[in-house]
Amino acid sequence: MTELRELQEISEMCNHLLEEIGFEFVGVAIQNEVGPDVRWHYASGNLNDKYKRITVRFGKGIAGKVISSGSAMVITDFPNDIIGKVTDYPIMLAERLVTSYAVPLFFHSVPKGVMLVGKREKYSFTENEQEKIMVSAQSLEQILKKYLFL
């Protein structure tokens, strides 16, 4: 798999979300080509490189839950606004995120990835912001289709 962090198109899109809407973190996770695990491949606005080592099982963590459900997931007050243990949300812990909005990335009509945006303070995403994130995710799907064979 091409290293996503090396792709200029992805970097530009994520940096645009950081700057235009004022998010503090944008990350991209993709399900492995073989097996059910999900790994974080790209981050912008990250505090450290821990995201590179985070792998979650299908259905676990934010990425695994979004991929398994095919639906967006919102957390507005981590760790107070969650189901399960805080350790089930390693990207939130690693990046000290309090608020996140994660949307599925579809390949051949099947959710195989996640784009997550977040803030390090309590925040409520507006409908307009959620729409911009969804549109960005759809654009990201088109970029990724050129590089991934899922």
Image (tube, grey):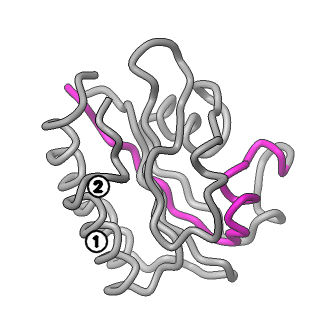
Task: Give the residue pinned by disc 1.
Answer: 132
Q: Is residue 79 toward the left or the right of residue 2 in the image?
A: right
Give the SS element for disc 2. helix
Range covered by the magenta-colored residues: 86-108
At 18% from the left edge and 55% from the top edge, which residue is drawn?
139
Q: Position of residue 6 (x, y in %)?
A: 31, 52
Type of residue at label 1? Lys
Question: Is 145 covered by the magenta stretch?
Answer: no
Q: Is residue 121 toward the left or the right of residue 132 in the image?
A: right
Query: How crowded is the residue under tag 2: few (<14 C-alpha within 10 Å), some, or many (20+)?
Result: many
Query: How crowded is the residue under tag 1: few (<14 C-alpha within 10 Å), some, or many (20+)?
Result: some
Q: Residue furthest top?
A: 34
Can you tell which quarter of the image residue 14 is in?
A: bottom left
Can you tell which quarter of the image residue 47 is in?
A: bottom right
From this view, report whether residue 6 is shown above or below residue 100. above
From this view, report whether residue 120 is shown above or below residue 59. below
Q: Position of residue 121 (x, y in %)?
A: 68, 82
Q: Position of residue 11 (x, y in %)?
A: 30, 64
At 44% from the left edge and 13% from the top edge, which residue is drawn?
34
Quadrant into which the C terminus falls = top left
From this view, report whether residue 14 is shown above or below residue 144. below
Type of residue at label 2? Ala
Quadrant into which the N terminus falls = top left
Checking the image for residue 137, the label placed there is 2
Give the SS element for disc 1. helix
